[in-house]
Amino acid sequence: MAKNDRDKNDPRIHGHGTGTVDTVLSVDEVAREAGALSQERPTVDKFAALADNTPLLAIESLNAGYGKMQILFDVHLQVRKGQSLCLIGPNGAGKSTVLHSIYGFTNIMGGSIRVNGQEITKLGPNQKLKQAKIAYILQDNSVFADMTVEENLWMGGYLMEDPAHAREAADKIFDKYTNLAERRHQLARVLSGGERRLLEISRALVMNPEILLVDEPSIGLEPRFINMVFEILDDLQHNEGKTIIMVEQNAKKGLEFSDVGYVMVSGEIAMADTGDLLLADPEVGRLFLGG
């Protein structure tokens, strides 16, 4: 039986969103139809306007990948201080690669990345954290399970010249998040999924970054913990002035949270607009929001 015929007869639902077998698109179909969205790509002026023409972080004509494999093609991105931006798109579109490139995990083949007008394209991850005040919160479980919650937080200050400064920063975080403080001396392995995610976010705050790169904050979490994580991110943005660039598999949740949304397709930015307008776009809804 040919693959296409086999897929037609398969009773399981594949791809994105909700609905019946007749209404849900396969992952391949989503990627193919999403490609049509990029026929009129956003202009540089559009990216600038969405950042109120005052970008804190600006990416221009970025070409990047891993080794000799190019994943990103002429990517532009602008986000102002205190703003949140969410990248959505089909699997393999290059969303996480944008975060990896900002933080120094990829091979930059062309283009530039600037923070406050300063070139940071070729800086390594440690320099990005210490000098450019960018922190990366990984999507994978990065908690040190055999260390205490407190020791995990201290690890967030590994670039500080004086370990005492890391301890002081950890104390401030415990003052803010009392549920972590209650488990201060317990091994991180006893934490729930939501508490582990909180610890990962908190550890990234030890160096007091200005920009948070957040990769799939909801991945693997129960709904009640997803809401908790987004409430924490909302507090960091609106009460502490953090700038957040996020990749989120739950496109609806990510766009509801974010001021600005970009749709990525095949390593390019296909659409860019406010989160609210992308949520209201019927094609975005059909392809990514299950509607």
Image: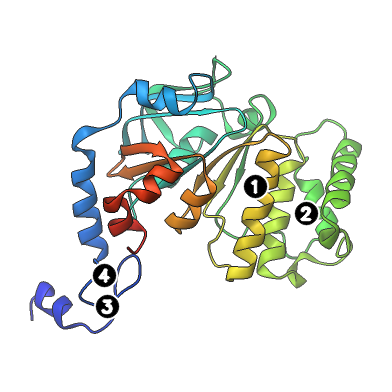
The answer to the question of whether label 4 and label 3 lie on touching residues, with beta carbons closer than 8 A, is yes
- Identify the element where label 3 is drawn: loop
Q: Residues within 10 Å of mark 3 (few under 14, many from 20)?
A: few
Q: Is 134 or 151 nearer to us in this picture?
A: 134
Expressed as whole percent of the image width and height from the top left, the position of residue 126 reads 64, 33
Expressed as whole percent of the image width and height from the top left, the position of residue 213 reads 57, 41
Q: Amino acid at mark 2?
A: Asn
**CA–CA distance in space, label 2 to label 1:** 23 Å
Which residue is denoted by mark 2 in the rendering? 152
Which quarter of the picture shows residue 270? top left
Q: Residues within 10 Å of mark 1 (few under 14, many from 20)?
A: some
Expressed as whole percent of the image width and height from the top left, the position of residue 231 reads 66, 54
Residue 89 vs 262, above or below: the answer is below
**Marked residue nearer the N-terminal end (2 or 4):** 4
Which residue is denoted by mark 1 in the rendering? 234
Which residue is denoted by mark 4 in the rendering? 24
